[in-house]
Amino acid sequence: MSGFEIYTFDAPVLRKKAKPVRRVNNTVRKQLDAMLETMREAAGVGLAAPQVGILKRMVVIDVGEGPYFLINPEIVSQSQETETKWEGCLSWPGYLGEVERPVKVCVKALDRDGREIWVEGEGLLARALCHELDHLDGVLFIDRAKSIIELQEDSFGEDQALSGVTCVFMGSPEFALPSLDQLVQAGADVRLVVTQPDRPYGRKKILTPTPVKQRALELGLEVFTPETISSPGAIERLKALEPDFIAVAAYGQKIPAQVLGLPKYACLNVHPSLLPKYRGGNPVQRQIMAGEQKSGVTIIYMSERMDAGDICLQKVLDVDPDETYGTLEQRLSVVGAEALVEAMCLVYTGSAARTPQNEEESTYAPHLKPGEELINWQASAEDIHNLVRALSPVPGAVTVFGSERTKIWRTKLLPSESYPFPADTVPGTILKAGDTMAVVRCGKGVIGVLEVQPAGKKTMPAKAFLAGRQDRETKFG
Ligand code: ZN
């Protein structure tokens, strides 16, 4: 991400008067885009250029209607009527001030393309416009505040940030556990945990509760496992609880409109991708398969269309080039839990953003289809490496060696120039069987195969696998 650093507290730049923008050129547009990115990363609703050290009269605002880019903005009119509310500032993290602002303002400015626009703001938008325009004159909200309070340190996550907040939690697999744990730790009153019914598991078909059910019972929480959440009985039961929030993490059933509309504040969902990318049931494996270097979690206000709701906040993570589906999903589950608590705090205090998803940029992450686990050695080394790590620890990428079906669990990308091979070598051919790996030719490039698992046997290093087999066979696939 190409975001800026936000200047805080006593930084002198926050007290300077910004200069008008003379020409709306590409530099200005790039700065505006980076400001928007910075603001979103910080989960704010407005940001003025001086806050990132640029002394130009420019602000970005997004209170959920999509972004406004305002250049040389001026207030042309404002209502006599005012309201006094709490507001915060990205340059004064950890503080809220009680500030009187006009209920309505009208602002004239140039947009991102240098065209004149008029923005009429009411409520939160009016407040954000006044707040950000103040920044351009070196005025901070603390100058206008009737009172200032310091939020409790680290109020997100620990320290009972959600005490007094009631919620229903819906989730099923391992991925949902950190979210449930964090809600409880943050002091939320989890009135009910809704999870999928016990299912037969393993060869003996033993009825097994979901990981979420097990954890909920350990925590002493009430558990509800309806076959269908859209049944009248299930809806009635949730309704009677009158929750402030419904928090959802990989529940596994479509949630009907009557349930989405139940909570007093919001129905929030933790999704392990940077929406609108990778909507659907299998976002983490698909991101690794595609070789994404950035991943993240998105907290959305749930809507009836799967994963299409407005965005409340996003957290970005770097993906290690050798990272597997298992480790990435685990990291995302932890970051997702923190983001969920943070989002609930923001929504509860009325300071959350709400940004619609850009439909044109949306992509879909379907479940694996049979056959997708098979390694195609004609593919590039990179694609094969991505497939292997996307299918680890389940279900495993598959190839054949002779007549033997074998899973490949770990691979490594290698510099092709270090392993020259004759042009007529078939992809899949083992070029070299070393101590730590087998070097294999791919459609493009070469790959190191480190760990394999023949059907019905344990996982073993490639060397052990090849010992005694290589006289019969010299290629995979
Ligand atoms: Zn501010």
Image (cartoon, rainbow, N blue to C red):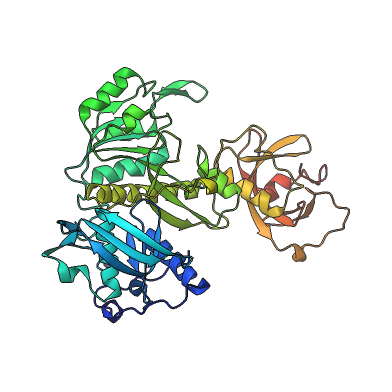
In the rendering, at what x and y percent does residue 439 appear?
A: 73, 55
**Relative horizontal placement of residue 345, taking residue 214 as reference (left or right):** left
- Residues 446 and 372: in front is 372
Image quadrant in which you'd find residue 111: bottom left
- Residues 78 and 336: in front is 78
Image quadrant in which you'd find residue 452: top right
In the rendering, at what x and y percent does residue 240 appear?
A: 21, 25
Residue at the spot 34% in from the left edge and 65% down from the top edge: 108
Q: So how many labels did they put on this image?
A: 0
243 vs 461: above or below: above
Residue at the spot 18% in from the left edge and 69% down from the top edge: 142
- In the rendered image, the quadrant that contains the C terminus is top right
- Residue situated furthest left in the rendering: 146
**Quarter holding ligand 1:** bottom left
373 vs 4: above or below: above
**Relative horizontal placement of residue 342, taking residue 117 as reference (left or right):** left
In the rendering, at what x and y percent does residue 458 appear?
A: 60, 39
Residue at the spot 43% in from the left edge and 23% down from the top edge: 199
**Relative horizontal placement of residue 68, taking residue 14 as reference (left or right):** right
**Relative horizontal placement of residue 367, taking residue 21 as reference (left or right):** right
436 vs 114: above or below: above
- Residues 144 and 407: in front is 144
In the rendering, at what x and y percent does residue 282 appear?
A: 52, 39
Instruction: Please say whether residue 252 is visible from this viewpoint.
Output: yes
- Residues 222 and 96: in front is 96
Instruction: Please say whether residue 448 is visible from this viewpoint.
Output: no
